[in-house]
Image (tube, rainbow, N blue to C red):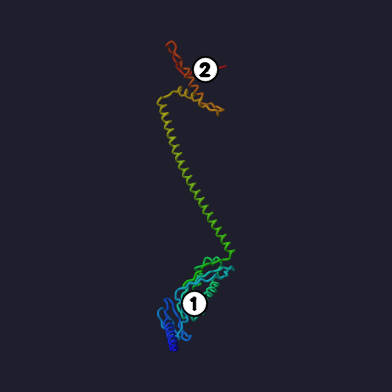
């Protein structure tokens, strides 16, 4: 009985293993390559699949989702003989599981080497400045070459990104100094523009202030002149209304002479030529004046002109 039990146990185990190998569950967005006696038979898609146990075997399970693979920095020489290290990131997707399995031994390694060689060809035709400012151009050229080369491997390259471009340390120091100089230059220009604008606004303000001040002074002078003219006109009309004679005018002229001579700075006093006429008029006025005595008056000469005796 014991040998029969052992045989039955072995048969149950074999049946269980056969069932496990017969039923294959493939996850979503995955595929499996089935080989029969080492030869490709079919590709299993997502879901429940049945294979022949001990005859069919699963060669490879492939993820059909988009994959992201970062590559380590690669030294690349530019057109002006400068070595730069470039980090790349590849976004790819397997579209044909059979081709990805049988057309290339390791498609990840193949994509990496193809990326390096293509990148060296592209960067070799650019100088450093263009390399640093033409990432989109490099990405587009690199993606075109990779997509064309990996198509027969069942790989589709969706996007290529340059993660970092690192020039040599000496070049980085020079670029940093240049950037600092450019920033200082822009700051100096902005400061000069601010000072210039401030001076312009100050000059405009002073100009407007001067114009307004001049207009105010002109109006004040005009009003002052108009007032003086009005005062002179009133005085002139008052004098003509009072009808003054030559005696009063001469007397007023003599009263103004001391005021003309006032002031410590007057070292020289010039007698006007009109003083003789004033004195003559005043003398005639005093000669015609005779103080009253005894209630009578002395009659004035009939003529203001007197003949002077000759002087020997």
Q: Residues within 10 Å of mark 1 (few under 14, many from 20)?
A: many
Query: Residue 298: x and y, percent?
Result: 44, 13
Query: Where, by quadrant of the figure, is residue 77 drawn?
Result: bottom right
Query: Residue 190: x and y, percent?
Result: 51, 54
C-alpha separation, residue under disc 1 versus residue under disc 2: 145 Å
Q: Is residue 17 above or below residue 298?
A: below
Q: Is residue 291 above or below residue 32?
A: above
**Residue designated by label 2:** 308
Residue farthest top in this picture: 294
Which is nearer the eye, 64 or 252? Answer: 64
Query: Where, by quadrant of the figure, is residue 231 drawn?
Result: top left
Q: How many discs appear?
A: 2
**Residue designated by label 1:** 150
Tag 2 secondary structure: loop
Residue farthest front in this picture: 1
The N terminus lies in quadrant: bottom left
Query: Residue 54: x and y, percent?
Result: 45, 86
Residue at x 49% of width, y 17% of height: 306
Of the numbered discs 1 and 2, the one sitting upstream in the chain is: 1
Which is nearer the eye, 10 or 80? Answer: 10
Which is nearer the eye, 8 or 265? Answer: 8
Residue at x 51% of width, y 78% of height: 106
Tag 1 secondary structure: helix
Left or right: 23 in relation to 186: left
Q: What mark, if any, has residue 285 been given in the picture?
A: none
Say whether marks 1 and 2 touch (CB < 8 Å): no
Q: Nearer the viewer, mark 1 or mark 2?
A: 1
Q: Residues within 10 Å of mark 2 (few under 14, many from 20)?
A: few
Query: Residue 104: x and y, percent?
Result: 51, 80
The C terminus lies in quadrant: top right
Q: Is residue 150 above or below residue 2?
A: above
């Amino acid at each position: 009985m014991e040998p029969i039990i052992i045989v039955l146990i072995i048969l149950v185990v074999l049946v269980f293993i056969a069932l496990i190998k017969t039923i294959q569950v493939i996850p979503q967005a995955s595929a499996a390559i089935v080989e029969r006696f080492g030869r490709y038979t079919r590709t299993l898609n997502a879901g429940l699949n049945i294979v022949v146990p001990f005859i069919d075997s699963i060669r490879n399970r492939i993820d059909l989702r988009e994959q992201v693979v970062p590559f380590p920095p690669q030294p690349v020489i530019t057109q002006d003989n400068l070595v730069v290290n470039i980090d790349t990131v590849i976004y790819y997707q397997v579209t044909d599981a059979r081709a990805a399995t049988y057309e290339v031994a390791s498609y990840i390694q193949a994509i990496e080497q193809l990326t390096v060689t293509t990148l060296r060809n592209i960067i070799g035709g650019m100088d450093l400045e263009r390399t640093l400012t033409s990432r989109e151009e490099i990405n587009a050229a690199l993606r075109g070459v990779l997509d064309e080369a990996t198509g027969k491997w069942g790989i589709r390259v969706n996007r290529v990104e340059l993660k970092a471009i690192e020039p040599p340390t000496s070049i980085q120091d020079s670029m940093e100094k240049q950037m600092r100089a450019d920033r200082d230059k822009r700051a100096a220009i902005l400061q000069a523009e601010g000072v210039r604008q401030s001076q312009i606004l100050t000059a405009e303000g002073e100009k407007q202030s001067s114009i307004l001040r001049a207009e105010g002074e002109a109006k004040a002078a005009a009003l002052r002149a108009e007032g003086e003219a009005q005062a002179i006109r009133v005085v002139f009309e008052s004098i003509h209304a009072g009808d003054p004679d030559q005696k009063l005018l001469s007397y007023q002229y003599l009263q103004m002479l001391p005021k003309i001579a006032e002031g410590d700075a007057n070292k020289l006093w010039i007698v006007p030529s009109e003083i003789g006429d004033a004195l003559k008029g005043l003398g005639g006025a005093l000669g015609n004046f005779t103080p009253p005595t005894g209630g009578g008056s002395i009659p004035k000469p009939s003529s203001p002109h007197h003949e002077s005796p000759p002087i020997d």
